[in-house]
Amino acid sequence: MPAAPDDVVSDLPLAADFAPATADDWRKLVDSVLKGAPFETLIAKTYDGLAIEPIHARAKGAHAIASRAAAAPWQVMQRIDHPDAAQANAQALHDLDNGATGLTLVFADAIGARGFGLPPTAEAVAKALDGVLLDAGISIELEMGPQSRAIALRIADDIRTKGADPAACDIRFGLDPLGACAASGSSVSPWSDIAPAVAETAKKLAAVGFHGPFLAADGRVIHDAGGSEAQELAFVLASLVAYLRALESAGIDLDDARGMIHARLAADADQFLTLAKFRALRLSWARIEQACGLAPKPLFIAAETAWRMLTRYDPYVNMLRATISAFSAGLGGADSVCVLPHTLVLGLPDAFARRIARNTQLILIEESNLAKVADPAAGSGGIEALTRQLCEAAWRQFQDIEKAGGAFAALTQNLIQRDVVATRAAREANVAKRRDVLTGASEFPNLHEKPAAVLDAIPHAPEPCGDATITFDALAPMRLAAAFEQLRDRSNDWLKATGARPTIFLATLGTAADFTARATFARSFFETGGIEAVDFAPALPPNAPPHPDPLPNGEREKSAAATQTAIAAAFKASGAQLVCLCSSDQVYADQGAAAARTLHAAGARHIYLAGRPGKLEAALRSAGVQDFIFAGVDALAMLNDAWQRLEQR
């Protein structure tokens, strides 16, 4: 059969056969699903109070926001943080041979050291980079701590001694005194002394041929401490401006000065917020350039996947979090991305964890071709709206910091810390209530998981950098899962001491259709706290009718009594001290109070019920039910209370 002519294929009507969909059409469909519930229930809010609407029209007049060249991939940075410089060198060479295009050298006293890192010496760097051709297109990023100025100059001298051309080296030196002060809550000098010193270091590096950037405005310190997207952006903007002023005061032309600084943002598993955050930084920076009378020029933005989202338990889920984070940063226009290995919370990652971190990016770039399109989110109504809102919120906070005298002054006044602490508290409250879900930690735990392997390495202890003359509140890093992990740690200690984990007996009433949903909820609820659930499966008579039970009242009462007797016997055999009743509201109305009395008489020390009690609460409490678990309850408080009861045995 001959092929159809091209014009036949091109003239197929396809979408023309469908009537155009309007916003009103979508709204009608949504309202039909809501069944009377207000439309506003679908509007989500960020921690900055920004509204995320469920439906958006296509953005008009939008244009791409990008800095990378057309179809150019971002730099695949691999973290080098082994305390032994020789081992770090072996890792670096292996990473470069297997797809990494850059190395992030993390020193022991850096913001992102996470307990490890290279010794802060030029000798350690020289050994770690032995065999790395620095002037052959390899990107190097330095993450240094309070002593960074002296180390940066010594590293530069060593590179020149080896014969590498500084102008051909792609090195981001990462000088960041503001970030170091924010993380430590202290400074050995006032900003009036720090600013000229760091600017002079940048001038010296530029004078010998390095093109930079030399200074880093690092938002991770805000993100690590639990801050919001706008708070992170505001701090980065304030740091960029502070460094720009310092360089200009040192006699450097503004056009040259802006090329000496770059930014770093955390990328987390909130896909759309992360994507919008990177786009918002570019737009906000362009506004600063405009205020300075400069023509727009791309700001180099580095990304690192977020520390606070990582979990110690079920660490393999961290791979998925890292994938979404790298995806979002890459599409948001990051110039470089560093993926934290999934086992970093457990210790120094081994070769497998490092390989996964590296290949996560390579798959996104080489197989998924994500870098082929510049700013694919441009024109998306939802992303454009979120980007705009973030720009506005971050700019207001940036102005507040400027009114306080700049980033350093705002830190000494605890202005920045106050807002971050409030956001952190809100996050922790939502994690405790499992509104912000952490798979494997606060939901769907695996109490029988095998620990992941990490390297046996001794961390390098950072050296003191002098006595602080100025102190203020430190922005301490946190992890969202830490409180639930502490409960799991208690469970592990219990297991080591007794040979078994503490248990809770799930008293399931009625048929599987009645209890399965709430029994599953209860199992996940208690096992996130390390309390293992023991099931009771009621033995139903052959050919038992489905619920509701059509048996005569007398027969139904006999059946319920027999079930309660069986539950009491199973509870005693389980050895558990705690009980959770699991079933439907209708079964609770028929059997809940009687089952609670039976279990209380059988020795249950504390009885929970899965579900909201509603009108039954008074009757259930009088029968012995003490607590109710349901979606939105403070799970962390409930689990801590359960542990106190268990430890009072």
Image: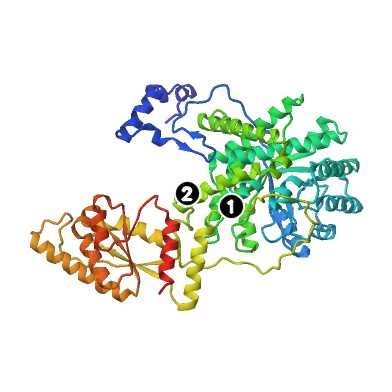
Q: Residue at x 29, y 61 (%)?
A: 625
**Within-10-Å neighbours for mark 1: few <14, some 14–19, many 20+:** many
Decide: is 599 above or below 138.
below
Location of the C terminus by quadrant is: bottom left
> Which residue lies under the disc numbered 2?
430
* Left/right of residue 612 with respect to residue 80 in the rendered view: left
Mark before the other along the chain sequence, 1 or 2: 1
Q: Which of 8 and 164 is in front in this view?
A: 164
Q: Check disc 2 and give the amino acid type.
A: Asn
Residue 428: image location, x then y, percent? 51, 51
- Looking at the image, can residue 450 be seen? yes
Decide: is 517 above or below 218.
below
Residue 485: image location, x then y, percent? 52, 61
* Left/right of residue 608 with respect to residue 159 in the rendered view: left
Q: Colour scheme used in the picture? A: rainbow
* Left/right of residue 510 with respect to residue 261 in the rendered view: left
